Image (cartoon, rainbow, N blue to C red):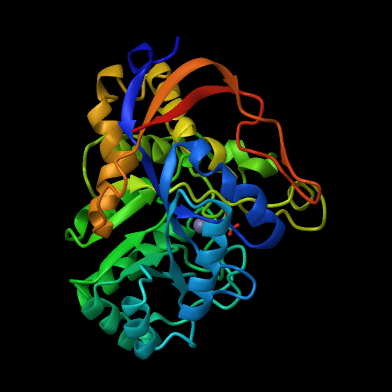
Amino acid sequence: MPLEKLQGVKLPASADFHVHLRDGDMMDLVTPTIRQGGVNTVFVMPNLVPPITTVDRALEYKQRLQAIEPNVNYLMSLYLHEDVTPETIVEAKKRGITGVKSYPAGVTTNSSSGVVDYSVFYPVFEEMERQEMVLNLHGEAPSTGDVTVLSAEERFLPVLGQLHERFPKLRIILEHCTTAAAIEAVKKCGPTVAGTITAHHLSIIIDSWAGDPFCFCKPVAKTPADRDALLRAAVSGDPKFFFGSDSAPHPAASKRGGDRIAAGVFTQPYTTQVVIDSFEQACENGILKESDITPEILEGFLSKFGRQFYGIGEEKNEFITLVKKGENIANILQSEKLDVVPFRRGQETWTVSWSL
Ligand code: DOR
Ligand code: ZN
């Protein structure tokens, strides 16, 4: 039984504040699918190979994205790295870069040049605070000692608290929250701290990725209680929580074969749809109530709160309409050179159409 009351609902276009659009053939394949997912604004992650650590490269990357799909607003970021200095931040602000993404060294895809000690970057954070730039944190402690993928996020949370305490005016986002503890930590901080929530973490749990490479990402999905905390935060109307899909495409071969499974769940062509599907499932399972899912709540989570936090307006006043009419998620997205498997391949979902 679909969430009947959402049939035909018109919402402002979604804004996706965490996407991986890659480079080369993969960029060519996935960038044209952004709008199919109901999205017209994206915050683009800088973990290319090599990572984007200069303003020139970020802007050159933006131009290539715009050439593929001009009807999307691309917010660009730099990768926190020793090459990024306070002077880089001043230049970045002047030239329209939005944020700086920090990956702890070694925790996920293309993070080998990540941060080992945050205090080294305090002068950079200070300048970011002054320039009103956003710090985007991949919140996982590296797996050493007794830290595992299951405890990595929780073990990172003290770092969030410390950074917030030291730089209270710096806008910080704890990206892709996956635990009830992360939600609580974000709530405990002041209004300069927010958390993004992905589409897939609103449905999957540990058992989903244990054995299924297409549900494996970092941070990994956690327990049902954690998932339910994410669902409740997403429909709470609290502007500290908004959408960032962390859509992370990998060639099907690097998910299915080889010695290691690449981390990343690909949701880009159906991001808005997968969020709605998850809310629907949660209603069916008694975790949420249908009365929790109002157009206003959807608008807040999918569009308004993130734009507010980043201080960007509705650039174009575009709208999407949701209809459930038997569309199925594609089994595969392919070009001559590559193929990528979308999350929940083959399953029924909502259809998005665009209007002004
Ligand atoms: O699962 C993930 N994949 N998590 C990340 O943080 C990075 C991403 C990627 O780039 O593939
Ligand atoms: Zn990511």
**Which quadrant: the C terminus?**
top left
Closest to the observer, 324 or 176: 324
- State the image coordinates of residue 259 (x, y, percent, origin top left): 81, 58
Closest to the observer, 241 or 77: 77
The image shows residue 155, relative to residue 285, as above or below, that is below
Quarter of the image holding residue 14? top left
The image shows residue 344, relative to residue 159, as above or below, that is above
Say which residue appears at 31% left-offset and 42% top-offset.
303
Say which residue appears at 77% left-offset and 49% top-offset.
338
- State the image coordinates of residue 182 (x, y, percent, origin top left): 34, 53
- State the image coordinates of residue 257 (x, y, percent, origin top left): 82, 50
The image shows residue 66, relative to residue 127, as above or below, that is above
Quarter of the image holding residue 190? bottom left
Closest to the observer, 267 or 33: 33
Q: Is residue 127 left or right of residue 60?
A: left
Quarter of the picture for ligand 1? bottom right
Q: Is residue 350 left or right of residue 109?
A: left
**Which quadrant: the N terminus?**
top left
Say which residue appears at 53% left-offset and 35% top-offset.
270
- State the image coordinates of residue 227 (x, y, percent, origin top left): 42, 38
The image shows residue 73, relative to residue 172, as above or below, that is above
